[in-house]
Amino acid sequence: MGALDSPLYFVVKLIAYCFWCYVGLRLFQPAAKLLPLRGIGFGILRLFMGFFFGILIYLLSSALITHIGAGLPENTITYIAVYVPIRWIEWSIMAALLLRGLTSTSPWILGSNPRDRYWRFGGILISCLADIPLIVSLGGVIPTGRFMC
């Protein structure tokens, strides 16, 4: 069973991303209008961004498995070493879109303030938690090399 076999996976991811993007809009643009609709739009963007980065993850995870062994199950190593950093990049892109007006690369990469960094870490946590239905449907196996992050 893969990610395509689990419509619940997509629904959970979409709801989680829409919710977290709405939270980001409330934090970074509290005066903006139509926040729920914009949160849905940004959530959909984040979902499709996962497709793009999923391809990158597939390539990285294939290379990483052959170089790291450290006694942990291969899927766990790959998940931690590849998915978490890629998700930081994804949520950084979302933060840049939500914050508007970032002019230098340092705030873009590291976050502009603690609130921004916590929101990005929260996004990573949300992304990982949204993987749980798929992990459960696969009998507890962490699926790596899938097309979505």
Image (spheres, rainbow, N blue to C red):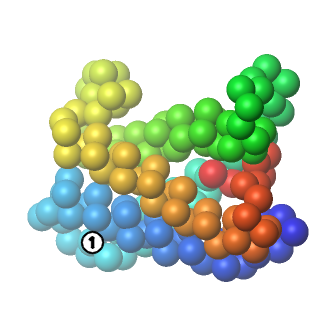
Q: Secondary structure at mark 1?
A: helix
In the image, residue 3 sits, relative to residue 71, either above or below, namely: below
Residue 100 can be seen in this image: no
Residue at horizontal 20 percent and vertical 71 percent from the top: 33
Image quadrant assignment for residue 6: bottom right
Residue at horizontal 54 percent and vertical 56 percent from the top: 128
Q: Position of residue 59 (x, y in %)?
A: 79, 33
Task: Count every numbered label the image shows and give the total.
Answer: 1
Image quadrant assignment for residue 58: top right
Amino acid under disc 1: Leu
From the image, which quarter does the N terminus lie in? bottom right
Q: Position of residue 125 (x, y in %)?
A: 44, 54
26 and 74: which is toward the camera: 74
In the image, residue 93 sits, relative to residue 22, either above or below, namely: above
Instruction: Give the left or right position of residue 66, taking residue 44 as reference.
Output: right
Instruction: Give the left or right position of residue 66, taking residue 143 as reference.
Output: right
Residue pointed to by mark 1:
35
37 and 132: which is toward the camera: 132
Local crowd at mark 1 within 10 Å, few (<14), some, or many (≥20)? Answer: some
Q: Position of residue 135 (x, y in %)?
A: 70, 65
Q: Position of residue 108 (x, y in %)?
A: 34, 30
Instruction: Give the left or right position of residue 15, taking residue 31 as reference.
Output: right
In the image, residue 76 sits, relative to residue 112, either above or below, namely: below
